[in-house]
Image: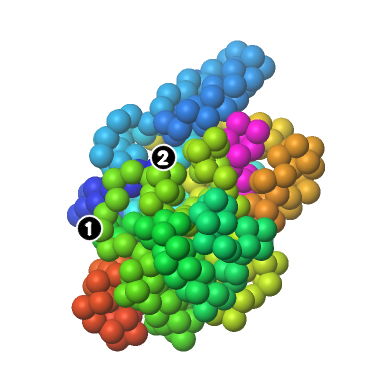
């Protein structure tokens, strides 16, 4: 399944601790002067075609009104991963002023490199972040209490299902029984038994750290009522809720309802799987290929949809410390995340702006595009990756334990999660 590419190169970046000044940004008089300076700046955009189109119109609109503060936009340069490219640019001192594709999981490492500017340092900076995104903004604070990223857009992860496959298996396509673990397992067995699809669902079984964001983590967020993987320096995943989630997925693999083999295409579009666990960015991919429906991720007892949390799958905007004209960069950041530009982003991409009450902020859009309403509703209940030191290494430590036990059954899942706790706790406390 196509997702924004993140590779083991980011893990290598996190482990090697690329040499750079510690802290969020350069300090002293230079930083103070830069915060007021205005002039030309460069920004980087994701290479997603819809986001590039949005970025070009945003830049054109800014430039038309600010001839003396020209913005130049380009796609993130090609590399093994965008995070590796950004990390290298920080080290070289030539990062752009703003990057509209900053992964929350990489912020702690970029901050450690001295590559990021705290947005709190601008007049009204903290207030702007928090007023725009509401209470969800709290999840994006760094451990020093500052914001080194602006929550920009998310893709609340839900369960997509193939209506034709469900109909073939004699399953209600309007309200499929998927709310509880027992219902989900029973439905999955019906799908496979009816040969409606080879597998009920096909999360990637590979060991990259980020794969847990699309199997364990959404269900853990739902089961726990919105907990993160790590909170207050302590691992949360070996709780009763985490072990219930692990046991559910172990059954899916043990009963051959999910596959242990890597799939190179899109298993949902290809019909190999009857369900997918993904966010609204995929709607455009499925258009004309799959007649789909979507429901919240399951919980053990079947929580009402309005109480279910999930993983955010967000990408954010950060300002980088190589930027000299930070006054302009801050103004551009606010312009690009204004209500008007957020609306244009929603129109262009179908991704949810991380804006408080997004479901009611753009009523005309959701009236015209009712398929997206459920994602806007879900956007009010999302959980981000924890903003902690050694974030990537923590996720890889968890993934190693999860893969060995849950996916491949080489160890009891509960014991494997227990075994990973101490190492994760130690990593979370390191600076």
Label 2 secondary element? loop
Rendered position, 211 above or below 33: below
Rendered position, 369 above or below 179: above
- Residue 382 seen by the camera: no
Q: Position of residue 145 (x, y in %)?
A: 52, 62
User: Which of marks 2 and 1 precedes in the sequence?
Assistant: 1
Asked which quadrant contains residue 174, the reply is: bottom right
Q: Which residues are magenta?
A: 345-354
Q: Position of residue 11 (x, y in %)?
A: 26, 54
Q: Residue at x 53, y 56 (%)?
A: 168
- Name the residue beneath numbered marker 2: 321
The front one of 9 and 195 is 195
The front one of 198 and 425 is 198
The total of numbered circles placed on residues is: 2
Q: Position of residue 408 (x, y in %)?
A: 25, 71
Closest to the camera, between mark 1 and mark 2, is: 1
Q: Position of residue 401 (x, y in %)?
A: 27, 74
- Name the residue beneath numbered marker 1: 15
Q: Quadrant of the C terminus?
A: bottom left
Q: Is residue 347 magenta?
A: yes
Tell whether 16 sits left or right of 285: left
């Amino acid at each position: 399944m196509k997702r924004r590419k993140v590779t083991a190169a980011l893990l290598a970046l996190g482990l090697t601790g690329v040499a750079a000044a510690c802290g969020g940004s350069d300090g002293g008089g230079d930083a103070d002067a830069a915060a007021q300076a205005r002039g030309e700046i460069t920004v980087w955009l994701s290479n997603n075609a819809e986001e590039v189109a949005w970025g070009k119109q945003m830049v054109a609109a800014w430039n038309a009104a600010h001839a003396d503060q020209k913005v130049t936009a380009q796609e993130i340069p090609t590399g093994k991963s965008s995070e590796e490219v950004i990390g290298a640019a920080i080290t070289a001192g030539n990062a752009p002023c703003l990057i509209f594709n900053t992964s929350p999981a990489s912020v702690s490492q970029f901050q450690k490199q001295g590559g990021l500017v705290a947005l709190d340092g601008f007049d009204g900076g903290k207030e702007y972040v928090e007023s725009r995104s509401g209470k969800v903004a709290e999840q994006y604070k760094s451990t020093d209490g500052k914001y080194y990223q602006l929550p920009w857009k998310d893709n609340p992860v839900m369960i997509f299902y193939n209506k034709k496959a469900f109909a073939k298996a004699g399953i209600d396509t309007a309200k499929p029984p998927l709310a509880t673990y027992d219902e989900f397992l029973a439905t999955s067995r019906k799908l496979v038994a009816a040969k409606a699809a080879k597998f009920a669902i096909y999360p990637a079984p590979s060991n990259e750290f980020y794969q847990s964001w699309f199997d364990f983590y959404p269900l853990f967020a739902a089961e726990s009522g919105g907990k993160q993987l790590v909170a207050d320096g302590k691992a949360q995943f070996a709780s009763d809720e985490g072990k219930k989630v692990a046991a559910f997925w172990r059954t899916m693999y043990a009963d051959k309802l999910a596959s242990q083999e890597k799939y190179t295409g899109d298993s949902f579009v290809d019909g190999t799987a009857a369900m997918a666990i993904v966010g609204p960015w995929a709607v455009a991919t499925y258009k004309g290929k799959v007649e789909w429906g979507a429901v919240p991720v399951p919980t053990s007892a079947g929580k009402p949809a309005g109480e279910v949390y999930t993983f955010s799958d967000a990408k954010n905007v950060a300002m980088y410390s190589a930027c000299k004209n930070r006054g302009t960069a801050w103004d551009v950041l606010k312009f690009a995340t204004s209500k008007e530009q957020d609306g244009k982003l929603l129109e262009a991409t179908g991704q949810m702006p991380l804006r408080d009450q997004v479901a009611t902020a753009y009523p005309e859009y959701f009236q015209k595009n009712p398929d997206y309403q459920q994602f806007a509703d879900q956007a009010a209940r999302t959980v981000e990756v924890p903003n902690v030191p050694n974030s990537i290494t923590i996720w890889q430590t968890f993934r190693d334990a999860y893969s060995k036990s849950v996916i491949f059954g080489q160890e009891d899942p509960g014991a494997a999660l227990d075994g990973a706790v101490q190492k994760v706790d130690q990593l979370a406390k390191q600076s």
